[in-house]
């Protein structure tokens, strides 16, 4: 399938191998071995995650096993889609049950930060050990998080469960994207992603019936059932990947002999001890950098969402301390990644022009999207009179449109072999949708206007996301695929977190002010109640004035989004218009194509014969 790719491990206090060239003395972060730096013993090996997934076709070939794998993979997607299409509806009502709707943005920000910083961790784990162990780890966190959410008896436990779920869900989402990137060519990658994401569509139409059947007051079971469904659907994928790896290893493959963990174990066996093994693993995953990044953004982005409820607002010493500490930690993170980290989160080798532009496109896409999306469902619930089923259907416009147009974009990419101009057109459509989204806040809240605002925003977004996926993954070598996916997800998640933080700050500040302005007869307690609970807001009187207050508040979110939505459109004009062909990426002549089962069987027989001769 693809050629093997090598990493390096540095051994302390050892001279380089005899005959090692200058390039082999270069550390992973791109710094060369200048005078005064410690000498290194370089062990070259193939990363386990890459070799194991490359061994996949060597075992499966073009047979019923391959089709059964993709069938099981699709089943996993259906479970993931069902989770996404239903559980998001419950969160607002779960928080309302604890009278903690004002914490919606704070939980969203923290969850986004956890999701963002965990992406590089899952990437490192998938490369260091294997895809199936990374998938198992993310499944465990997902299940524990939803179990905690379902059993929550207060807002704090609910928030903790959501944070754990976010880390696990980020891993599942990352592994979906990574496995597709591993096993598909550039021409078909967008289409395969589109086909898999299309599994969200049926549940978008069924979600209303499901949520109505469970009832929003019984949201605990809505979360708890996925503690059963998801493990049942993901377990076959893990077992099939593990089986393929074991079979390749028994046949003489290299997959079990070439991870950083194995190389570090060699170091430990040379009397360097287990402490160096632990240090090597921590260094390879850049654990310190991830912690610095996570804490810095959590401290920087949480205060805007907490300001409205803090004593003294921005004058509260805790708010100032969070900002200062977050700023210091972010500076420390930058210095760590630039000067110290041996395996930085963003290695310089992946930062080509197209990849950086894709980062910018998706960063602003998520920033503007979350700026208006966090409270869109709350706004919709208050300003309309939809039934629970119709309300759920309206909230599924986004899912259905994104999936349909993501699939259409994949089809066009496969047919034309290009992505750039399609992405530019999608981003232009998104600008029109953003304009309608702003227009509806002036009282134009008919179903037609609400539908087309969301439809155009998501149609353009679905096209753009597929373009960014294919272009960013295609711009790097296979050994950097996991890192590229993780870095793109990292900065898009941070963009979303910034949008959520800004949304929370604006909403929490503006909604009480607008309620006091449009309904001066309300007391402070009534305003607090209406702002904290959407069901109370919908039932409160005078309804027309309360709707005006909600429209004015949502308008304050829509205007900055309308301005910023043009930034990714400009960026998309400067990406490289790659030819999408049978290669895994545009940097290597590596064709992604499963061999026939006859070729697979013949090679396995040759390996067995060679091993038998060697034993004889």
Image (cartoon, rainbow, N blue to C red):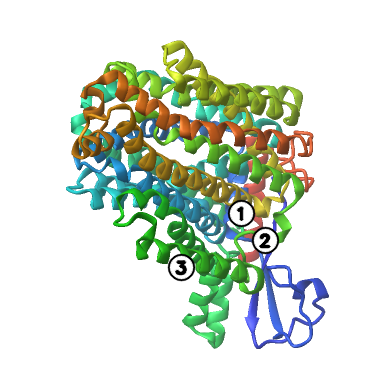
Looking at the picture, does residue 425 appear above or below residue 252?
above
Give coordinates of residue 87: x percent, y percent. Answer: 32, 34
Q: Which quadrant holds residue 201?
A: top left
- Helix, strand or loop at mark 2: loop
Q: Residues within 10 Å of mark 2 (few under 14, many from 20)?
A: some
Separation of marks 1 and 3 at Cα, in angstroms: 28 Å
What's the residue at 60%, 64% (across, down)?
258
Which residue appears at 70% of the width and 36% of the height?
A: 186
Looking at the image, tell me whether mark 1 or mark 3 is earlier in sequence order. 3
Q: Residue 335 in the image: state x and y as whole percent.
A: 61, 70
Task: Name the residue nearer the viewer: 188 or 539.
Answer: 539
Q: Nearer the viewer, mark 1 or mark 3?
A: 3
Task: Work out how far the residue at label 3 is from the one at label 2, CA to CA, in angstroms.
Answer: 26 Å
Image quarter of the N terminus: top right
Q: Mark 1 points at which residue?
A: 483
Q: Which of marks 3 and 2 is in front?
A: 3
* Label 1–label 2 contact, CB within 8 A: yes
Check the picture and name the quadrant holding the C terminus: bottom right
Mark number for residue 347? 2
**590 w.r.t. 483: above or below:** above
* Residue underneath mark 3: 325
Mark 1 vs mark 2: give the one in front.
2
């Amino acid at each position: 399938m693809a050629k093997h790719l090598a990493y390096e491990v540095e051994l302390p206090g050892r001279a380089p191998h005899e005959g090692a060239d200058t390039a082999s003395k270069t550390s992973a972060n791109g710094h060369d071995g200048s005078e005064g730096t410690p000498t290194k013993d370089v062990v070259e090996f193939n990363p386990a995650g890459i070799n194991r997934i490359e061994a996949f076709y060597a075992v499966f070939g073009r047979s019923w096993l391959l089709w059964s794998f993709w069938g099981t993979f699709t089943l996993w997607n259906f479970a993931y889609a069902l989770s996404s299409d239903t559980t998001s509806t419950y969160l607002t009502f779960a928080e309302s049950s604890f009278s903690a709707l004002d914490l919606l943005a704070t939980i969203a920000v923290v969850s986004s930060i956890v999701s963002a910083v965990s992406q590089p961790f899952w990437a490192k784990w998938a490369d260091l050990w294997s895809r199936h162990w990374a998938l198992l780890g993310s499944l465990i966190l997902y299940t524990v998080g939803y179990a905690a959410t379902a059993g929550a008896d207060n807002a704090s436990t609910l928030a903790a469960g959501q944070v754990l779920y976010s880390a696990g869900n980020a891993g599942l989402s990352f592994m979906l994207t990574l496995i597709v990137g591993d096993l598909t060519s550039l021409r078909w990658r967008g289409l395969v992603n589109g086909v898999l994401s299309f599994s969200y569509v049926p549940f978008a139409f069924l979600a209303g019936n499901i949520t109505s059947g469970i009832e929003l007051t019984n949201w605990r079971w809505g979360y708890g059932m996925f503690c059963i469904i998801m493990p049942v659907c993901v377990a076959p994928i893990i077992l099939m990947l593990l089986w393929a790896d074991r079979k390749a290893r028994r046949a003489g493959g290299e997959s079990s002999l070439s991870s950083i963990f194995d190389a570090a174990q060699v170091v430990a066996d040379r009397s360097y001890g287990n402490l160096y093994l632990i240090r090597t693993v921590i260094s390879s995953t850049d654990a310190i950098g991830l912690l610095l990044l996570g804490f810095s953004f959590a401290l920087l982005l949480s205060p805007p969402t907490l300001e409205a409820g803090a004593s003294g607002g921005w004058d509260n010493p805790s708010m100032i301390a969070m900002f200062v500490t977050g700023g210091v930690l972010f500076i420390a993170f930058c210095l760590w990644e630039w000067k110290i980290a041996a395996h930085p989160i963003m290695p310089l080798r992946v930062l080509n022009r197209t990849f950086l532009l894709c980062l910018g496109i998706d960063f602003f896409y998520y920033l503007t999207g979350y700026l208006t999306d966090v409270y869109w469902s709350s706004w919709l619930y208050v300003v309309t009179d939809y039934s629970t089923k119709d309300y759920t259907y309206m909230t599924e416009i986004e899912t259905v449109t994104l999936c349909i147009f993501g699939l259409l974009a994949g089809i066009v990419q496969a047919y034309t072999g290009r992505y750039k101009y399609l992405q530019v057109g999608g981003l232009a459509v998104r600008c029109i949708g953003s304009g309608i989204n702003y227009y509806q806040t002036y009282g134009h809240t008919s179903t037609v206007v609400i539908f087309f605002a969301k439809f155009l925003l998501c149609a353009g977004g679905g096209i753009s996301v597929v373009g960014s996926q294919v272009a960013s993954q295609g711009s790097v070598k296979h050994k950097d695929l996991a890192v590229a996916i993780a870095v793109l997800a990292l900065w898009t998640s941070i963009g979303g977190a910034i949008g959520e933080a800004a949304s929370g700050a604006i909403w929490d500040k503006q909604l009480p002010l607008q309620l006091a302005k449009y309904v001066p007869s309300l007391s402070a307690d009534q305003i607090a109640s209406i702002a904290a609970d959407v069901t109370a807001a919908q039932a409160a009187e005078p309804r027309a004035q309360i709707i005006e207050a909600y429209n004015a508040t949502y308008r304050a979110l829509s205007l900055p989004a309308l301005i910023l939505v043009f930034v990714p459109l400009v960026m998309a004009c400067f990406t490289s218009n790659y030819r999408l062909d049978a290669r895994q990426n545009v940097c290597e002549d590596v064709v992604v194509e499963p061999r026939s089962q006859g070729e697979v069987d013949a090679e396995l027989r040759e390996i067995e014969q060679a091993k038998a001769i060697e034993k004889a």
